[in-house]
Structure formats: structure tokens, C-alpha cells
Image (cartoon, helix red, strand yellow):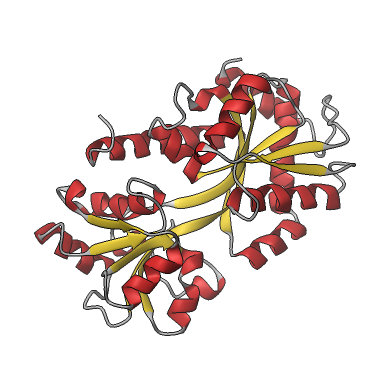
Amino acid sequence: MQRPVRKLLLASALLFSASHSFAFEPARSAECIAPANPGGGWDFTCRSVGRVLTDLSIISGNVQTVNMPGAGGGVAYAHTVSKRAGDSALLVAASTATTTRLAQGQFVGMSADQVEWVGALGADYGVIAVKADSPYKTLPELMEALKKDPQAVKFGGGSAAGGWDHLKVLIAAKEAGVPNLPKIRYLAYSGGAEAITQVVGGHIQGFTGDVSEVQGFVESGDLRVLAVLSEQRLPGDYAAMPTAVEQGINAVAPNWRGFYLPAGVPDDAYAWWVKTIDDVYASDQWKQVMAQSGLMPFHKSGAEFTAFVNQQIQDIHDLSVEIGLLK
């Protein structure tokens, strides 16, 4: 079914339902595929949402998390596309890592329109930070240095070259008008903590990663956050950190946490899952999960989320072409 029609059906379903009273009756139990080994972000997303679904009695049975690692999410994506079409009892965890790989063609032969995008219910926003005694006091100052010499600052992060951490600093640089983006230096480390250690030790000058990775180092006086890549300042302990947007650089980079469904699910089942993700996000139980895990407010669902995913894929694809990762 074409998405404009699905959008109309979804809107109608939500208009006439104040609760979960759709014609679709969910299975007693559900399955959530985490496209990685236990312990990572996708595993957390499945298990945390699964607990809330049962705590709220939205699912009367249990939500089984199935770990399916491989190809950076590609194994789970291919499994969903080729073997699970129409399965209304299946959720698959996704994030910005998923859209990055789709944008860069790493899920060979597959595209975003082969699944149904349900919603996102939190994000870990990107951040650019330097050593506390760095000469760079603001993000514009750092970007001015890159404009003069794109190799003036060496950045490090926890993703591979061309991965999401790398792209965060390139998104900011592009928005700031820095030329020669491929010449900006980036070193990939095994994780964010290792990259931060290199910054604190003076071996590299800039860290690009997630805001949840830097808080302890800011409190200890080791790091200075130049910018959080969010639309507005984050709440709580992060409120003192300036955004790139407020400094005149329109760079926003959320690492969202959410889900997709197999293609071919009935429209009322899709509408039920969209409403369910909305309800989970609004619940006190999920607010507690977010507070405990450091997830920041970020919520889109249904047609809005699908449009967001498609735009993010296009933006990442265009940036990847610009820096020479893709032709």
C-alpha cells in the first residue's frame, strides 16, 4: 500500500481510538529482534521497551528479545525483508546506525522502503568536545580554524571512518561552511571512552561522539563541550552545554532509538504499533527508563517518522558522496 493511503488509514484509526481498541488484536506475545549481541544499544531498546509493554499490560504475555548480530544490522534486516513479511508480532530495533548503513549501501540490495518504520522513543545526541584547556572555547572558533586549514584539528570517535561519529563532525563542518570536508582528520577508536582518553592525553584535539559519553569527563574537569548537536538545550545535567544551533551552526545529529516492522503487515496492525510506541513514550515507566539510561527526549512515529528516516538517509548519502565515501 502506498504511504499516502496508509497515512490516511492511520490518521483515521487514531482519530476514532482513544486506546488500543483497533480491529487488530495483537498476539499474546511478541518478538523483538536486536540486530547485535547482548549488551548494546539495540539489545537495550528491545529489552527495555519489552518490559514496559508487559508492565503496561499492552502485551499480555512476554516480549522475547532475539539477538541476531551480523553485518552491522544487515543480517536482521535481510531476515526481516526475506522471511518475516506480514508478521505483525515482530518488532526490530533500529537507530541512526541503521539509516547510516542504508544510506551508504551497506545493506546490499536492500532499501528503506522494504520495511515499515514505526517510531522512535529517545535519542543520544551528538557532541563535539575538546580538552578542558583547549584554545578553542566555542564551536565557531574551532570551525574557523578548520576553514583556514581542514587538517588543523584531529578528531577521534568510536565509529569507523565514515560511520556516525565521524559524520557528526562533518555535519557540523558542512553547516559552518568549512570547505574540503574529506581533508578533515578523523581517527577511529574501539569506543568513545578510548577516543576521549586520547583527547585528554593531548594526542588528538577533538572528540566526536554521544553526549552520554562525556558527562563524567566534563564533571571531572577534563573535557569542555563545544556543542551538543540537538535542536535545543538538553535537560538536567546537560543543560549547561551549548548547542551548535544557538551558536549559529544548524547541526543536529540525534542517534535515535526506535523500531521497524516487516513489510506487508495489515494497516490496522501498523496503526496499533504506532499508537503503542506513542503510549510507551508517554508512560511514566518509559520516562524512568530514559532517566536511568541517559536517553534524551526524541519522539516521532508513523508517517512523520517514516519521512524523517527517508530524509536522514538522503542527507547521510549526500554527505557520504561529498566526502568521497560513495560515488
* Number of marks: 0
Residue 299 position within the rendered picture, expressed as x and y whole percent measured from the top left: 59, 48
Would you identify the image quadrant in which residue 13 lies? top right
Vertical position of residue 54 compared to residue 103: above or below: below
Q: Residue at x 45, y 71 (%)?
A: 214
Q: Residue at x 43, y 40 (%)?
A: 100
Of residue 294 and residue 35, the one placed in the foreground of this image is 35
Vertical position of residue 270 compared to residue 173: above or below: above
Quadrant showing the N terminus: top right
Would you identify the image quadrant in which residue 265 lies? top right
Q: Residue at x 37, y 34 (%)?
A: 104
Residue 258 position within the rendered picture, expressed as x and y whole percent measured from the top left: 60, 44
Residue 196 position within the rendered picture, expressed as x and y whole percent measured from the top left: 39, 70
Quadrant showing the C terminus: top left
Residue furthest to the left: 148
Residue 127 position within the rendered picture, expressed as x and y whole percent measured from the top left: 40, 62
Residue 303 visible in the shown view: no
Left or right position of 7 against 102: right
Vertical position of residue 322 compared to residue 229: above or below: above
Of residue 16 and residue 266, the one placed in the foreground of this image is 266
Of residue 230 and residue 73, the one placed in the foreground of this image is 73
Q: Residue at x 41, y 60 (%)?
A: 209
Residue 129 visible in the shown view: yes
Vertical position of residue 19 compared to residue 127: above or below: above
Of residue 196 and residue 240, the one placed in the foreground of this image is 196
Residue furthest to the top: 1
